[in-house]
Amino acid sequence: MKSVSPLAVAAVSLALLSTASGAKPKAVDLSKLPPAAAKPNVTYAADIKPIFDGTCIKCHGAEKTKGKLRLDSLAGALKGGDLGKVIVPGDSANSFLVQAVARIVPEDDAMPPADKAKPLSKDQVALIRAWIDQGAK
């Protein structure tokens, strides 16, 4: 069995903690995010779940739960998964979910994976941003 240096363990732990706490990875350029939609009163049930149903639920739903992240319910989305919370209510730019679906993170973290589903449109990302900025309700 190959041993792992304590420094390597510390580096990985720090990276995971940064992501789990909602901190953005250093490589992320938030200026590349589309602005939040102007639509008022965006809700998970009426506006966001239909987006997730079309692209995210195959991997983040009841039948399959990659990274222990469920997006098929408001409670599941707010709970987060293996990386911790991916939504920071009131702060879409620093929500990893938005960064991932806007594809401004490294390709391995971009969602949905390019080989699995069509990326979300800028309008869809903008609506998700508005939902989160309005409190993710």
Image (cartoon, grey):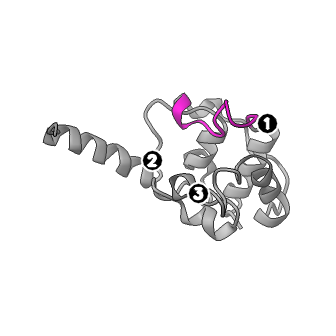
Residue 77 % position (x, y): 62, 62
Q: Name the residue under label 1.
A: 121
State the residue at coordinates (78%, 59%): 49
Amino acid type, residue under disc 1 in the picture? Ser
Q: Please tell me in which quadrant of the rendered image residue 48 appears.
A: bottom right
Amino acid type, residue under disc 3 in the picture? Thr
Nearest the eye: 2 or 99: 2
Q: From the viewer's perspective, tell me whether residue 39 is left or right of residue 11.
A: right
Amino acid type, residue under disc 2 in the picture? Ala
Classed neighbour count for the residue bearing mark 3: other residues with Cα under 10 Å, few (<14), some (14–19), many (≥20): some
Contact check, label 3 and label 1, Cβ < 8 Å? no
Q: Which residues make up the magenta segment?
A: 107-119
State the residue at coordinates (47%, 52%): 22
User: How many angstroms separate mark 3 from mark 2 (CA)?
Assistant: 23 Å
Residue 65: give its label: 3
Which element carries disc 3, helix, strand or loop? loop
Which corner quadrant holds the N terminus?
top left
Which element carries disc 1, helix, strand or loop? loop
Residue 14: give its label: none
* N-term-proximal mark, 3 vs 1: 3
User: Main structural element of the magenta stretch: helix, strand or loop?
Assistant: loop
Query: Is label 3 or label 2 in front?
Result: 3
Q: From the viewer's perspective, tell me whether residue 49 is left or right of residue 65.
A: right
Residue 75 % position (x, y): 63, 70
Residue 23: give its label: 2
State the residue at coordinates (63%, 50%): 92
Residue 127, magenta (yes or no): no
